[in-house]
Amino acid sequence: MRVVVAPDKFAGTLSAVEAAAAIATGWRRRLPDSELVEVPMSDGGPGFVDVLHAALGGELLAVTVSDPYGGAVPATVLRVGATAYVESAQAVGLHLTAPAARRPTVATSRGLGELIRAAIDDGATRVVVGAGGTATNDGGAGLLSALGATAVGGVLDAGPEGLEGLESVDLDPARRATDGIELVLASDVDNQLLGLVGATKTYGPQKGLTEEQLLTVDGRLQRFAELADRKAAAAKGAGAAGGIGYALLLLGAVRRPGVEVVAEAVDLAARLGGADLVITGEGAFDFSSRSGKVPYGVAQVAATSLVPCIALAGQVLVGSREMRALGIEAAYAVVDRVGEERAFAEPAAALAELAERVARTWGR
């Protein structure tokens, strides 16, 4: 039996590479003669570069960039030929700061701009940016500042607070810095920048913005967009990663679903050839998975190859009808098998145990 194992990370517990290995380990306990093909996946969020490096090889360039509050943080540029892959979460990720220490009103995306500049300085002519999992909600103003953009009446690299009193924005230096560079925005969401379904309202609370701060921050981003380009603020993906998507669109980036970018890069469709089953997964499998998440993306590729797809997740929060609407035949939760405490204490062992149990049903 040929089984392709293509999960995303299990946020906070396992990387995609670790999750794929755990699932394969558990499956082999039950069916040691199965052919397991591990294809770790990403939607553009944390783990984007690691997944691509595992699949594509290439060269890693180590750099030091600014974290969300101006400190130093290590990050990497993955070079594969003329293409560079960079990850917003490495530079300005939410995971870099403990919840109690998060300050979303001053967090800046400057570090990602520095990472993009490092890729360009290294000779890349195409830069693919995995956008997701950030602590920032500055509309990408900090990113633009790192590439040379300037402002009057405000500060671009001081978070949304720095945008107060903004009078004008000059993007020409940033556009010159990226002239001739093919930019790709690989995001896990397609939200616009502003409004009820925008970056602030939808994702601001998980970054630490209070209900009272949401309206103020969104207003500052609105002013920024009015001065930069209001039309681009309504584009799909502009709200990705706290508005980093918007900044990249201002620089001429093409937006693509992150899982689609990764699926193509790792040649997932070809690796499904001859497969009897695809196993995908993520930390929490819910209906939001339809919005660019890995399980939905993997299921779509599996459907074109007529291969059944199942999901293993930390938690399963959808019913059978919604599950099938996502293209998933069945989904199984780690917490239902071993309990929440052990799922977090021993995530790899718990996921392997679940995979072993699932092999009894789906194996042959």
Image (cartoon, rainbow, N blue to C red):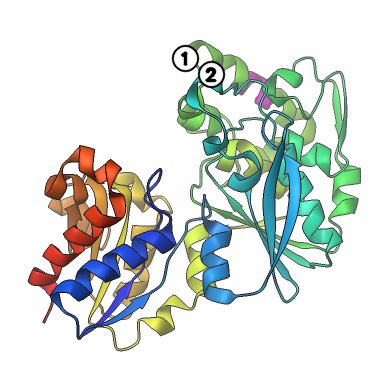
Rendered location of residue 328, percent (x, y): 23, 62
- At a point 71% along the width and 45% down the height, the residue shown is 112
Residue 27 sits in quarter: bottom left
Judged left or right of residue 159, residue 278 is: left
The image quarter in which residue 25 lies:
bottom left
* Residue 189 higher or lower than 103, as above or below: below
Instruction: Determine whether the residue tagged by mark 1 lies in a helix, strand or loop.
Output: helix
Magenta stretch, residue numbers: 218-222
Residue 221 place in picture, x, y as percent? 67, 26
Rounded to the nearest angstrom, the CA distance separating label 2 from label 1 is 5 Å
Which residue reaches farthest left? 361
Residue type beneath disc 2:
Leu
Note whether residue 7 is visible: no
- Residue designated by label 1: 211
Q: Which mark is residue 140?
A: none
**Residue 291 in view (yes/no):** yes
Q: Which of 80 and 289 is in front in this view?
A: 80
Evaluate if marks 2 and 1 touch, with contact meaning CB atoms under 8 Å apart.
yes
